[in-house]
Amino acid sequence: MLPFSSLIAFPLALDATYGEHRTALLVSACLQAVYTWSMIYGSAGLFRRLMRKDNRRIRYVSDSAYWLYLMHPPLVLLGQSTMKDWPLSASVKFIGLNLVVMALLIVSYQIFVRYMPIGWTVFGGWRFASITVVMMVAFRRAASLLGCSGSRTREWVVQLDTVMAIASATTSGDSPVPPAAAHA
């Protein structure tokens, strides 16, 4: 499928759109659609063949893809408006902006999404709850070892106890949230 799309569909679509033999808009649009869908199916087939085993890095990128998709437009627009008057070539700006935005989004995904409630919501459950529970237990123990006894610390401990109870119930299968509400 990839050879067909690269060697046949792409040149025909390109010629129909911009070449000497420009054709009707409908023919051009159909050839572009054939190229696009053949690339999609060809790429999916290629990755199914090459990625037979589970790969942690690919899985991480896959898990972060939705966050990147949702959050990239404002960062790209901000970056474009910032870089528009820089005396660099368009390709350097393009590559630089992509690298910076990707790095910011991966870091923000790791810190703010992956092991946090927003991540549980995006992924439809408590998939990463065990790490969060460990972090909460560590915080509670550190607070008690340090003798923190302020009202703010007590509020945090109560909230952490509640979250840990919910997390342990959901990981054991006794979810306090009805299944319909958990995936809504």
Image (cartoon, grey):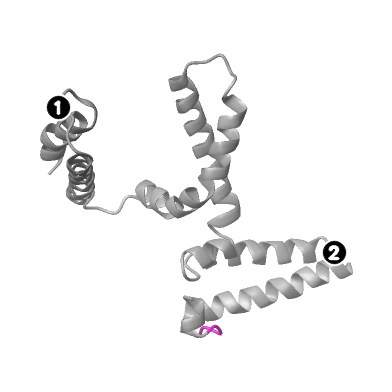
**Label 2: how many Cα within 10 Å (few below 14, some 14–19, many 20+):** few
Q: Residue at x 56, y 85 (%)?
A: 176
Foreground residue, 171 or 86? 86
Q: Secondary structure at mark 1?
A: loop
Foreground residue, 17 or 157? 17
Q: Is residue 144 magenta?
A: no
Instruction: Judge from the rendering whether residue 110 lies leftward or rightward of residue 144; answer left or right.
Output: left
Alpha carbon separation for disc pair 1 and 2: 78 Å
Q: How many labels, in total? A: 2
Q: Is residue 175 magenta?
A: yes
Q: Which residues are magenta?
A: 173-177
Q: Position of residue 83 (x, y in %)?
A: 58, 25
One can see residue 52 in this view: yes
Q: Position of residue 135 (x, y in %)?
A: 63, 61
Q: Amino acid at mark 1?
A: His
- Up-down relation of residue 141 to residue 173 (above or below): above
Asked if the residue under mark 2 is in contact with the one under mark 1, i.e. CB atoms within 8 Å, the reply is: no
Q: Amino acid at mark 2?
A: Cys
Q: Residue at x 14, y 33 (%)?
A: 12
Residue pointed to by mark 2: 148
Nearer the N terminus, badge 1 or badge 2? 1
Q: Residue at x 17, y 45 (%)?
A: 34
Residue pointed to by mark 1: 21
